[in-house]
Amino acid sequence: MGRLLSVNVGLPRDVIWQGKTVHTGIWKTPVEGPRMARRLNIDGDGQGDLGGHGGERRAVYVYQLDSYRYWERHLGRNDFVYGQFGENFTVDGLPDAGVCIGDRYRIGGALFEVTQPRVTCYRLGIRMNEPEMAALLVKHGRPGFYFRVLEEGEVKAGDEITLVASGPEQMSVSEIDALLYLPGHPAARLERALRIPALSAGWHRSFEALLKQESKDGAATGNAGLGPASSPAPAWRGFRPLRVSRKERETRDVISLLLEPTDGQPLAAALPGQFVVLRLGPTSAPGLMRSYSLSGEPGAASYRVSVKRESHGAASTYIDDELKVGVIVEASAARGTFTLRQGDTPVVLLSAGIGVTPVLAMLHALAAEASTREVWWLYGTRSSREHPFASEVRGLLAALPQRHSQICYSSPDPADRPNVDFDIRGRLDMHVIEKLNLPRDGDFYICGPTSFMSDLSAGLAAFGVAKDRIHTEIFGAGPSSTPGIAAPPRRPPHVPAGPHGSGPTISFARSGLNVRWNPSLQSLLELAEACDVPVRWSCRTGVCHNCETGLVAGQISYHPDPVDAPADGNVLICCSRPEGDVVIDL
């Protein structure tokens, strides 16, 4: 049926690309003689990004000679060598349109099973010196595919490839690839794909998300199979005027605002843990825009946000010193995916400093329903002077029959009482958590400084908590995450150098930056990079679907008239002004 033309291997290396250091195993070189095909790879081979490549279901990547010839014609090139596309096996035969997910092949002394199309990332563009190559493979339906090694054994160039079993449903690699990436996701075909046991877990989750989207009423936006978990659509578009009905001091540097509608119409109930974007100051100017987590009971008639005054924070200083009761502010609808999951599993709420606000909303929700779930409240701050909502939290916990609480003060005042005001002297960290006998099967919600969240997330995972039960919320701009690229020195977000743009104002809500659009830029992503605003997923090809996490990093293009743009994709377009200003939250 086919023949193995070349066995190609290569270990990851660091390469310089666009001034960045990229760790990649895309360079593969043909080898002579037999090599062992093992459960995770071919002897002598390695993957640079084990999140997007490698693993048992992606042990061996296969590409076809016919596709080599196709790309030579399409690109007008004749310089290809075996391993050019980063494949382990270069084969004659086995076209993507003819090979089906679940097919099993005998090659030499090993037995293989087809598990998924290849998810092509930006690193192929580096190897090919063709930036659009990853997108072209999807567009032209020539992705190649991955093998799982069912029986380990030796393979070598020249081995025959024999089909020994056909996959159920007989859905080809090309068909599965198009079902995810191209328009049109018929429910019947999605259901067929989900019946294929060999299909890798990431693709299975993507098709489940697409099937769920197809079953909903109304038009869907974006591709649920490629996106992260999404929250419900915002209750309203753009901004809505809300009046500051009350202003309360929680501590010397934390202020709460109660916001009520000006039109007498009720506010939509927010999910516990969500946030809003506030536009502060004159409506005739871009003003100050910031995102704040809601800290009150989600079903209340008003929204409560609680803001910590920072020494150089323009918005927090304005709120503390100038914003008066009765003033109108503009607010987006509540949004965000850091929300309390329903169910009967234990809930562990961990926070530090002003990170208490979203988990406090979750505690309100649990107390309001008198939840019988096991609830743990873990909080860290310096002392009682910097401990907001202390009495409020005690009252909420009293309504929960299965409650646990641990308060850590890192620098308690002399008047602070052990076992009354606080339980532990020191920081809330894994040393504390490991002594508490927390339920490993619970859902863990973490909010606070970035280092606090990263340390606890890593510690909890090592502690035995499943990664999908560890949830975090970031205040301010989140960290960039472009797989394989070494993290550069972090600079604070800033207005880019050079002439100012003349277009609409783009406001990065979590970075607190307002910048005029420059028509010379091609996308919002380019503007974010020019401002050193961290972009969580910043691949440009639009097809970097990480099959183990279900995340995609697509290019977000600027639209000349982004009025009432939907919240969709990984760059969240929060709201807009009639004249075209846009708030985005990265």
Image (tube, grey):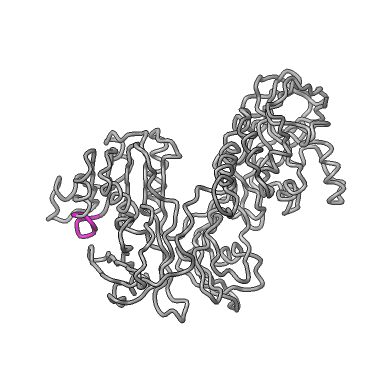
What residue is drawn where x is 42% and y is 72%?
279
Horizontally, residue 121 falls left or right of residue 386, namely right
Taking the image as drawn, is residue 493 in sight?
Answer: no
Q: Is residue 392 above or below residue 141?
A: below
Q: Is residue 555 above or below residue 575?
A: above
Quarter of the image for residue 419 reads top left
Residue 121 versus residue 98: which sits nearer the camera? 98
What residue is drawn where x is 47% and y is 53%?
232
Q: Is residue 578 above or below residue 8?
A: below
Q: Position of residue 100 (x, y in %)?
A: 72, 31
**Was residue 389 drawn as part of the magenta stretch in this picture?**
yes
Taking the image as drawn, is residue 221 in sight?
Answer: yes
Q: Quadrant of the N terminus?
A: top right
Q: Position of residue 73 (x, y in %)?
A: 87, 48
Q: Is residue 556 above or below residue 581?
A: above
Count of numbered tags: 0
Q: Position of residue 324 (x, y in %)?
A: 29, 76
Horizontally, residue 424 falls left or right of residue 236, namely left
Q: Position of residue 61 (x, y in %)?
A: 70, 34
| Residue bounds of the magenta highlight | 382-391
Horizontally, residue 208 falls left or right of residue 425, namely right
Quarter of the image for residue 55 reads top right
What residue is drawn where x is 23% and y is 59%?
386
Farthest-out residue, bottom = 284
**Was residue 253 drawn as part of the magenta stretch in this picture?**
no
